[in-house]
Image (cartoon, grey):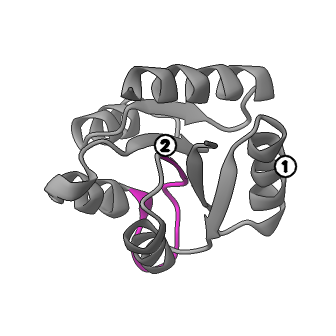
Amino acid sequence: MPKKILIVDDEPSIIVALQFLMEQNGHETFVAFSGEEAMEAVARHRPDLILLDIMLPVVDGFEVCQRVRENPDWKDIRIVLLTALGSDVNVTKGLDLGADAYITKPFSNADLVAKVKELLECQG
């Protein structure tokens, strides 16, 4: 059964590229363009993993990450923060909020695929 991946970004070109990449690797994908849409999609689809941008309108990726981590029903969802914000402060904040990985844009497709595979395999 394919793993479900939620892709959250406010940039349509990034969504399309990530969706193509994840589907090429056998995953079922869902998309959200804002933090609010992301929370609705998590509740509706229960993804195995979220590729989450930080800079989103209204509710940012940090808050989405925190909300997912606060819900015990979602404790097994893996979160990869995928963002242009590469400062040590942001990386530390993201990981402290419960992200499983922090990848800065621009990123290597091969590295992203490898990290997604690794996180999904350790998920059980």
Give the class, few, some or many, for how many residues have Cα within 10 Å of label 1's Cα (few <14, many ≥20): few
**Residue carrying label 1:** 20
Give the answer, above or below, for where 57 lies relative to 14.
below
Q: Identify the residue shown where x is 84% and y is 39%.
A: 24
**Residue carrying label 2:** 81
Residue 28 x/y as whole percent: 68, 52
Marks 2 and 1 sit apart, C-alpha to C-alpha, by: 18 Å
Q: Amino acid at mark 2?
A: Leu
The segment highlighted magenta reads 49-61
Residue 72 x/y as whole percent: 15, 54
Classified by dominant secondary structure, the portion drawn in magenta counts as loop
**Badge 1 element:** helix
Give the class, few, some or many, for how many residues have Cα within 10 Å of label 2's Cα (few <14, many ≥20): many
Q: Amino acid at mark 1?
A: Phe
* Quarter of the C terminus within the rendering: top left
Horizontal side, residue 112 vs residue 88: left or right: right
Q: Identify the residue shown where x is 74% and y is 59%.
A: 15
Q: Identify the residue shown where x is 74% and y is 35%.
A: 106
